[in-house]
Image (cartoon, rainbow, N blue to C red):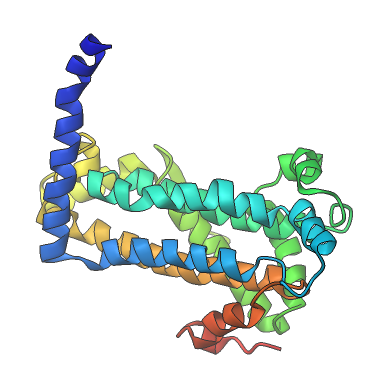
Amino acid sequence: MDEVRKALEPWMNYSRDVMIKNLEFLTRNYRDVIDSCYDLLNDIIDIGMWIMPSKTLSEEKRMNMLTKYLMYPMLIHVVYPNLNFLPIAVLLGALPQAFYTIRTALEAFVVTLYADNKEELRDLPWFEKVGHKSVRNVTVSGVKCSLYKILAKVFRDKESSEWVNYILDLYQAVSAWVHPVARIRIDKREELAAGIIRAVMITTAERGIPPVYGIVIPMEYTDEDLEDLKHLNDIINFTRLATSLIAYAWSIVKDVADGEALRKIIRDDEIGKEAELT
């Protein structure tokens, strides 16, 4: 054990030093992205409290909700642990991994909304939903029609369609960062190359140096990384709205602790103001 520790200690010390220096860099140059990481994490904590079964319910009904709905274990065991890593990934200079945590959380919300509302799954306990074929094989793009039907029960038709496209576009944007090569669709007729190697290539061509995640991870940030960090910050803020939107749509017909708090997030958000709640 001492030999293993001795071998790993320089690497652990290096990682710690990189995180400290990156925190100093971000504090000086772009603190917004760190603040946004914790804003998103705090949103998830708030959502977790708001969607808990109402205390006005009997203990039996509360336990029935906790056993029935996939949202509860998904939020506790998938979304929160992954997003808790988000600020760590940012401080390590591991931007692809930061995007991956966001993608995982967003996908978890979408799958949960689908599984907890699908007619044939609705009344099953959550652990049976997870094993069901329709959930095992689910993809975010593959449940577009189902998402629209669910959101149409909460928002007006036009807004429902816009919200579904918003979620799918966001998922596509974060997915482009988690594959070596990928593609993003601009419209029905045009697709563009994407992926990590494409991002590295573009950054190198434009700034004369690869981004930190294209050299080694962990790595200290430079000014050339600020554009990618600003993009990540935008994605985090888009994700805050998307997760709150999905949580609200999920909670609308359920006796949760504070559905009005979720509604207020959507209503008060600058983008959310454009969607009229029914």
State the residue at coordinates (21%, 10%): 3
Q: Is residue 23 above or below residue 96?
A: below
Q: Quadrant of residue 18?
A: top left
Q: Is residue 116 above or below residue 270?
A: above
Q: Quadrant of residue 149?
A: bottom right
Residue 61 appears in view: yes
Horizontal side of 133 relative to 19 (left or right) equals right
State the residue at coordinates (47%, 65%): 239
Residue 237, horizontal then vertical, whole percent: 40, 69
Total numbered labels: 0
Which quadrant is home to the N terminus?
top left
Viewer-closest of 17 and 159: 17
Residue 97, horizontal then vertical, whole percent: 37, 43
Viewer-closest of 119 and 190: 119
Q: Is residue 43 above or below residue 17?
A: below
Viewer-closest of 93 and 65: 65
State the residue at coordinates (42%, 43%): 178
Viewer-closest of 253 and 178: 253
Residue 190 appears in view: no
Residue 197, horizontal then vertical, whole percent: 32, 39
State the residue at coordinates (38%, 47%): 85
Residue 52, horizontal then vertical, whole percent: 66, 65
